[in-house]
Image: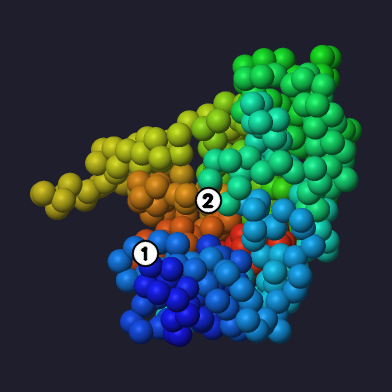
Amino acid sequence: MNTNAGATAQIFDIVIERILPGGLGLTHSEGQTIMVALAAPGDRLRVRIDRVKGSVAFASIEEVLEPSPHRIEPPCPYFARCGGSDFQQLNSQAQLDAKVEIIKDCLNRIGKIENVPAFQITPAPDEWHYRSRAQWQYDAHQKHLGYYESGSRRVCDVAECAVLVPELQRELENLRQQMAEDALPEDARYFRAVVGDDGVAVSPGVRSPPVREGRGLNIRRTIGNETFTLNAESFFQTNEHLLPELIDAAIGDASGETAIELYSGVGLFTLPLARRFKRVIAVEENRDAAYFARQNLANASLTNAEIETKDVAAWLALECGGKAQRRRRFGSDRRTGNPPRNQEQIQSAVGAGALQIDFLLLDPPRTGAESRVIDGILQINPKRICYVSCDPATLARDLRKIIAGGYSLDSIAAFDMFPQTHHVETIVNLIGP
């Protein structure tokens, strides 16, 4: 590392080794780890150290001295200001390669999985204009509508976003026109929007009516052979082009008696699971999402799935507590060694309440599953587990616990659901002990 200014300026010349989870470029020099935003592997850069935490320095680019062969000119005029699309400086293949390495790094370093199975990443059919859900931040005082600037709560005023589907771009323009006319709610903090088969639903981040009087908040989305009703506040995968393949990778040829789905949302996986299993129990804490899930099941004429509107950890605790109680009541007495009641009596009593789970699917938020959720999963002991994740770090953390509980990796698949960003969707299937 060559110092090109005094110690107070902290300007250095470095070469980027690789891209880390979180999308930062990494280099090492003189016992210090340096992480650089918006870098490409192989870049020779002049960087400014912005802050230091222990032996790790965080830096920003002052000048690209010699660009990496993977570096391209970012097409977005808001690049480096807007907090989204932080991979625009990388060509398509470099983005995919970086995401595969990010997953491998997390599984190895955080998950302590030494031999990560080989896997492929499925690219998005469209690297641009793919996002069918959006949240636009609104600053009524500054008259800014867009996304937060990187590392701040300042709103970057965005007139055009190249990753939005055309319907959402038009909606952004409509909102900006209303902003210019002072027609937006002054107390709105953000606007959420989602595209459906029958239009766009918009929800302002206030307790007030829709932006346009009389406009319906619910929309329908058709994915493969399934149709879902939802609104702008509902969580739903943002890149619909990859969803059929994502669902297939998650469920595959799984079938049987009972499946459980945790963090089930409006039923993206619930409906296809209900077509494969005789009984499905889906757990979702959000009442609106659970309402839509029930509606979507009813519209599909699927009566073999039930939606539990409960906190996932609390539901598992109830289920595990019930199983433990049944074991104490009908199992052998460990203190005396007395045998249990005859097997027919046990099966009749326990089988009425205890679940024998063929398949469990969880799709938690970016923060991953709580420790007590993982503990509950291990206690109910499903034969197979599918973990759907949008964050490789929390995925690896949770997999470490699941594997320690006796499960083994069966397959890994990755999907480039979020081109131009460091985010990636990962599907991991595990087999029980």
Locate residue 141, reporting x and y percent.
64, 26
Among all residues in the image, which is located at the extreme front? 6
Locate residue 57, reporting x and y percent.
40, 68
Could you say whether the residue bearing mark 1 is in a helix, strand or loop? strand
Q: Nearer the viewer, residue 280 or 64?
A: 64
The span from disc 2 to disc 1 (Cα, nearest Å) is 16 Å
| Number of dots carrying numbers | 2
What residue is rendered at 30% in x and 66% in y? 54
Could you say whether the residue bearing mark 2 is in a helix, strand or loop? loop
The amino acid type, in three-letter code, at marker 2 is Gly
The residue that mark 1 highlights is 52
Quarter-wise, where is residue 184 in the image? Answer: top right
The amino acid type, in three-letter code, at marker 1 is Val
What residue is rendered at 39% in x and 35% in y? 314
Pointer 2 local density, CA inside 10 Å: few below 14, some 14–19, many at least 20: few
The residue that mark 2 highlights is 151
> From the viewer's perspective, is 12 left or right of 211?
left
Which image quadrant: the C terminus? Answer: bottom left
Locate residue 292, reporting x and y percent.
68, 29
What residue is rendered at 40% in x and 83% in y? 29
Check the image and tell me how it is coloured.
rainbow
Q: Nearer the viewer, residue 88 or 399?
A: 88
